[in-house]
Amino acid sequence: MNVINTKRLILREWEDKDLEPFARLNQDQKILEFLPSALTFEESTGWINRIKEHFKEYGFGLWAATLITGDHGLHRAGTRFIGYIGLNIPAFEAHFTPCVEIGWRLASEYWGYGYATEGAQAVLKYAFDELRLREVVSFTVPANTRSIRVMEKLGMKRDTSGDFRHPKLPLDHPLSWHVLYRVKHEKS
């Protein structure tokens, strides 16, 4: 599996030590504002297992995002797990699938520092340069302005004709309506 490095982040394979902070992240009330429900520890474990299977099947996925910490001089820097950033093939059918989605979920204490944008820019470059994808999509609920801002910083454009009700949520669920963003490879 490829590791993606940025100035402040390492996007890498998932490790056993990531489970506990990932499970905490999936209980964070700020994150849950735009998700249907919290994940239990067992559900978080299952999520990581599905991510690992996705990597095995497709060669890419949602990388564990780690922040480079510590002294950057003579001593080796450490890392701290902060969430995930990566690519996913959605496991549902919609008018725009099959597709490759770019997504991120970071612990709320790491919001506002540009980590999602920095990591997603590197992932998008990988998607176009290494995987040779022609297009990448992203979607979220309209109220998730932070994620929408990241999408726009990535050069993604809203496809208003592509907005949709998420097929894994009941039609009357308050989070069922999603906006769709797209970006095409410049050379496509």
Image (spheres, helix red, strand yellow):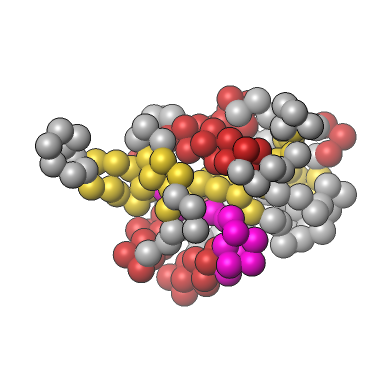
- Residue 138 shows in the view: no
**Vertical position of residue 39 compared to residue 62: above or below:** below
- Residue 49 shows in the view: yes
Q: Total label count? A: 0
Q: Position of residue 74 (x, y in %)?
A: 12, 37
| Residues shaded magenta | 53-65
Residue appearing at x 37%, y 64% in the figure: 15
Residue 129 in the magenta stretch? The answer is: no
Q: Position of residue 89 (x, y in %)?
A: 69, 56
Q: Position of residue 186 (x, y in %)?
A: 72, 27
Q: Would residue 24 be found to the left or right of residue 77 on screen?
A: right
Q: Would residue 109 be found to the left or right of residue 99 on screen?
A: left
| Quadrant location of the C terminus in the rendered image | top right
Residue appearing at x 65%, y 46% in the figure: 131
Residue appearing at x 37%, y 32% in the figure: 7
The one nearer the camera, 117 or 40, is 117
**Vertical position of residue 143 compared to residue 104: above or below:** above
Instruction: Specify the quadrant of the image occupied by residue 137.
Output: top right
